[in-house]
Image (cartoon, coloured by chain):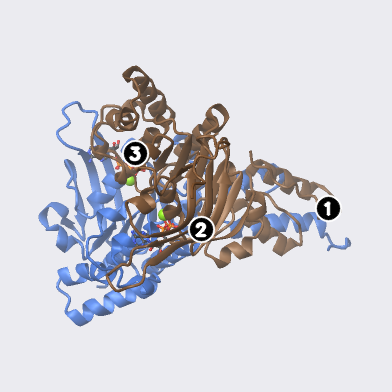
């Protein structure tokens, strides 16, 4: 009964196997609410799995299943299994799981305790027993990375929405987790803040081989970071692949309330108008393809470069 | 009612505000802000994190009162009217919907406002039904708001504001975290509201959404208004946007990069981009005498 502790698992290996989950009934007598159904994926250290899906498709529930809040705090019925480096998130205490998994929640207020910004960031590492000098170093570097160095002594309850989100990201980074789970980490951020988060995550992947699970409603963000992208609809994975593969199915995405990245959407509109064969996700590639198409004569209709998002 | 067209609904006059008892002078959230909001205007308020957008929004609906300057709604100073009376004229959807929701069911939450301002039960019911329909919330009307996914909670919070049919909608990041369907619904709601003669002040970090939705854009920086003009002027001005840590909408950025090839540099949305690019492409490839595809 123990698939736990498979020797090959690094602490950062995430395995989700046939996960189904029902929240407890909304009221006694009603049926349990199904949020996830038959989800399977695997992420190794240094990999990023993106999760995209319409409102209510189960993204946050899946995120919470990775650190044990689902089902340990929420209750409900679980089938299948989630393991982090061999630890089952159903049975390992959440406190122990937090030594491997840090979560940036969709609502920043969920994790802020209303103290100073530096206390917010120190809170996680302190609980993990990290020595004070090391905590000090982490406070400084993580706040700096999210552009909040100047707010160290401000109370977290007295910050703007985007400033709170930045602090919450810094606090998760400060735990230096093997697995980082982010639920809409840039929703409240300005364009520069979003770029900063992308840069931080890329650095983590390169330097620390962190495993990243990223749920978001922003297709550009998902395309920029995901090695594998899962599309959720009503709790099921309805499509998976690289961002390029997944986003090529624009009309299918639209049927479940989603969109491709804006530039790919643009490419599809142009193809419909002109009979061209554009397919770009990213500014530099789009510029090249659109320029080439104006210069070549007669039009080479198959000249679009498959985008590589790096 | 005739003649009200020319009178702004909201006048923000030289307003400054600092939180708490900051003696250090550094805590100014907004400084000397002047702004008028008129009938039929769909204004986007943009600016980097911490630039004062939410603080300004909370002045428009009277939640905050200016430290100096004044805010007039239909000519009345917000300091002189209780906030629940202002709610009939100015509706505010919070940046964090969880700061707004409190009732045990979605329909109760949405009905609270209309009931609180004194509508009779039949009217309360009619209004709740109307906004539930408008935002597609029929399937969750009996649910507990806190057991819903977050984007649905955001729509419920918005519905509660719409149910009061205020003249001015102040929406603090209304599309944050919403899927494409829900974004379209919100866009339809705000357009409908201004077409009816109302006004909207919309805060957003989504440059593409702002460009495609607003007809006027105001930029805040460090609590001050640094730009206020038609959407096409503001959202296509690369140096203005970058100077304020903002960005061009993706299609505008691409159009400007293609400008040396003859592309129109001031497109605001995908439709405009495609029309302009297609015209160039056709001129190039489908000249009379050549055989196009
Ligand atoms: N505590 C809860 N109790 C009962 N049902 C819940 C609870 N939390 C979420 N649900 C339901 O589970 C489903 C999945 O919700 P979840 O929050 O995971 O969606 P999501 O994809 O994150 O949505 P969003 O994009 O709006 O954040 C929804 O039907 C939601 O109403
Ligand atoms: N309750 C508060 N107490 C003290 N200072 C605050 C409070 N709320 C916000 N501030 C500060 O006031 C400034 C303006 O905040 P505001 O919330 O208006 O910004 P914003 O433009 O809405 O930002 P965001 O895009 O992050 O939501 C910020 O520097 C912030 O730190
Ligand atoms: Mg969610
Ligand atoms: Mg704000």
| Mark 3 beta carbon near ligand 1 (under 8 Å) | no
Task: Check disc 3 and report its element: helix, strand or loop.
Answer: helix
**Tint applied to chain B in the drawing:** blue
Give the distance between the C-alpha atoms of the residues marked 1 and 3, in whole angstroms. Answer: 59 Å
Q: Which residue is mark 1?
A: A300
Residue closest to the far bottom? B122
Residue B12 vs residue A74, the one in the foreground: A74
**Quarter in which the C terminus of chain B is drawn:** bottom right
Mark 2 vs ligand 1: CB below 8 Å:
yes
Q: Chain of mark 1?
A: A
Horizontal and vertical percent position of residue A70: 38, 52
Residue displayed at 34% across by 68% down? B197
| Quarter containing the N terminus of chain B | bottom left
Q: Secondary structure at mark 2?
A: strand
Q: Residue at x 75, y 55 (%)?
A: B281
Q: Between disc 2 and disc 1, whose residue precedes?
A: 2
Q: Residue pushed farthest front?
A: A1
Mark 1 secondary-structure assignment: loop
Using the image, determine if residue A231 lies above or below residue B160. Answer: above
């Amino acid at each position: 009964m123990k698939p736990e502790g498979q020797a090959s698992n690094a602490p950062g290996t995430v395995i989700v196997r046939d996960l189904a989950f029902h929240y407890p009934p909304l009221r006694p007598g009603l049926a349990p609410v199904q949020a996830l159904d038959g989800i399977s994926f695997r992420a190794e250290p240094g990999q990023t799995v993106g999760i995209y899906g319409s409102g209510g498709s189960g993204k946050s529930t899946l995120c919470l299943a990775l650190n044990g809040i689902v089902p340990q705090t929420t209750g409900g019925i679980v089938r299948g299994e989630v393991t982090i480096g061999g630890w089952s998130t159903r049975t390992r205490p959440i406190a122990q799981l937090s030594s491997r998994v840090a979560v940036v929640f969709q609502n920043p207020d969920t994790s802020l305790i209303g103290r100073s910004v530096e206390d917010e960031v120190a809170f996680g590492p302190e609980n993990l027993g990290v020595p004070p000098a090391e905590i000090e170093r982490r406070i400084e570097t993580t706040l700096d990375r999210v552009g909040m160095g100047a707010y160290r002594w401000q109370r977290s309850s007295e910050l703007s929405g985007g400033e709170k989100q930045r602090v919450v990201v810094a606090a998760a980074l400060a735990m230096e987790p093997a697995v980082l789970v982010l639920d809409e980490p840039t929703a409240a951020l300005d364009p520069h803040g979003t770029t900063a988060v992308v840069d931080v995550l890329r650095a983590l992947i390169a330097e620390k081989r962190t495993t990243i699970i990223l749920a978001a409603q922003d297709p550009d963000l998902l395309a920029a970071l995901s090695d594998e992208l899962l599309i959720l609809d009503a709790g099921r994975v309805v499509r998976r692949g690289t961002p390029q593969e997944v986003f090529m199915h624009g009309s299918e995405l639209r049927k479940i309330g989603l969109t491709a990245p804006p530039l790919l959407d643009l490419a599809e509109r142009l193809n419909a108008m002109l009979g061209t064969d554009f397919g770009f996700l990213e500014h530099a590639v789009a510029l090249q393809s659109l320029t080439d198409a104006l210069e070549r004569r007669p039009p080479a209709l198959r000249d679009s470069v498959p985008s590589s998002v790096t | 009612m005739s003649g009200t067209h020319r009178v702004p609904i909201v006048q923000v006059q030289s307003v400054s505000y600092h939180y708490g008892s900051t003696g250090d002078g550094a805590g100014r959230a907004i400084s000397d802000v002047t702004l008028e909001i008129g009938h039929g205007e769909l204004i986007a308020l943009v600016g980097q994190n911490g630039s004062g957008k939410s603080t300004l929004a909370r002045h428009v609906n009277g939640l905050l009162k200016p430290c100096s300057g004044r805010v007039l709604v239909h000519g009345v100073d917000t300091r002189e009217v209780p906030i629940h009376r202002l709610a009939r004229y100015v509706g505010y959807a919070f940046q964090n919907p969880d700061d707004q929701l409190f009732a045990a069911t979605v329909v109760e939450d949405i009905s609270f406002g209309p009931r609180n301002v004194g509508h009779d039960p039949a009217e309360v019911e009619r209004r709740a039904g109307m906004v539930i329909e408008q935002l597609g919330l029929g399937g969750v009307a009996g649910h507990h708001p806190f057991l819903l996914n977050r984007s649905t909670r955001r729509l419920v919070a918005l519905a509660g504001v719409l149910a009061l049919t205020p003249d001015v909608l102040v929406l603090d990041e209304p599309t944050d975290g919403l899927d494409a369907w829900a974004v379209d619904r919100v866009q339809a709601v705000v357009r409908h509201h201004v077409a009816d003669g109302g006004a909207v002040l919309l805060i957003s970090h989504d440059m593409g959404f702002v460009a495609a939705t607003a007809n006027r854009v105001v930029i805040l920086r460090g609590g001050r208004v640094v730009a206020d003009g038609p959407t096409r002027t503001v959202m296509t001005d690369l140096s203005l946007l970058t100077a304020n840590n903002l960005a061009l909408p993706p299609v505008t950025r691409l159009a400007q990069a293609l400008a040396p090839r003859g592309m129109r540099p001031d497109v605001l949305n995908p439709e405009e981009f495609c029309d302009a690019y297609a015209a160039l492409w056709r001129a190039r490839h489908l000249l009379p005498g050549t055989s196009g595809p």
